[in-house]
Image (cartoon, rainbow, N blue to C red):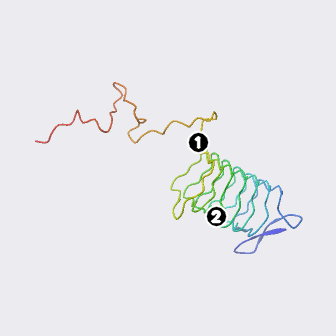
Amino acid sequence: MIVVHRETGEHLLEVPGDTLAGARLDGAVLLYADLRGADLRGADLRGADLCQADLRGVRLDGARLAGADLTLANLAGASFQGATLADARLQAVSLAEPGPARTDFRDADLSRVTLKNSNLGGAIFRDAEMRRIDLTAGRPHLGHLQLRHDGRGRPHRRPAQPDGLRRGARPRVGSGTRPLNDVSRLRPRA
């Protein structure tokens, strides 16, 4: 099978056989690759660079993509069931239907990801960077979603509030901080 650049047609990779299922492609540089409809089930893509690749309809079930970069890749209709994307970068992509059910996203960067109508059942997002995620236009199926825990099944403590304090915490004497609602030092204007 030959993988080509989606715009220039240049050969990026040649693999013996008709499929990429189970292929060892760790560290492969596949920028702008045209992999539409490819079968990558169980493939080893750890550390691969798939930035802006066309991955529409790709089957990545059970694939190992730890540390891979899929920034701006077209993942419309891609299947990730049981895939490992720990520490991967998936910035500005859409993981809409069928969605990443039972996928491991531990420590992944999912900034600006669209999860509209996604099946997130059993997905693991522990310590993932999830800024500006889009969950609009429908309700994603959350199933047994794991967001964060400390390895012993307990949730992490809440992050610090904008004033640097956890909810309910009081500032230490002499710390130089005070709760936002502390008005004891304010004086009325003359």
Quarter location, residue 58: bottom right
| Residue occupying the far bottom of the picture | 8
Q: Quadrant of the C terminus?
A: top left
Q: Quadrant of the N terminus?
A: bottom right
- The residue type indicated by label 1 comes to Arg
Q: Which residue is mark 2?
A: 97
Q: In the image, residue 68 lies at what x, y percent?
A: 69, 54
Q: In the image, residue 16 lies at what x, y percent?
A: 89, 64
Side (left or right) of 125 relative to 188: right
Between tags 2 and 1, which lies in front?
Answer: 2
At horizontal 82% and vertical 69% (from top left) the residue drawn is 2
Q: Which mark is residue 148?
A: 1
Q: In the image, residue 118 lies at what x, y percent?
A: 61, 60
Instruction: Name the element at disc 2.
Output: loop
- Counting residues from the start of the chain, the first of labels 2 and 1 encountered is 2
Instruction: Name the element at disc 1.
Output: loop
Side (left or right) of 111 relative to 27: left
Give neighbour class at mark 1: few <14, some 14-19, many 20+ (Cα, 10 Å): some
Question: Relative to residue 72, is residue 10 depicted above or below?
Answer: below
- The residue type indicated by label 2 comes to Glu
Q: Which mark is residue 26?
A: none
The CA span between labels 2 and 1 is 23 Å
Quarter location, residue 97: bottom right
Q: How many marks?
A: 2
At horizontal 60% and vertical 56% (from top left) the residue drawn is 141
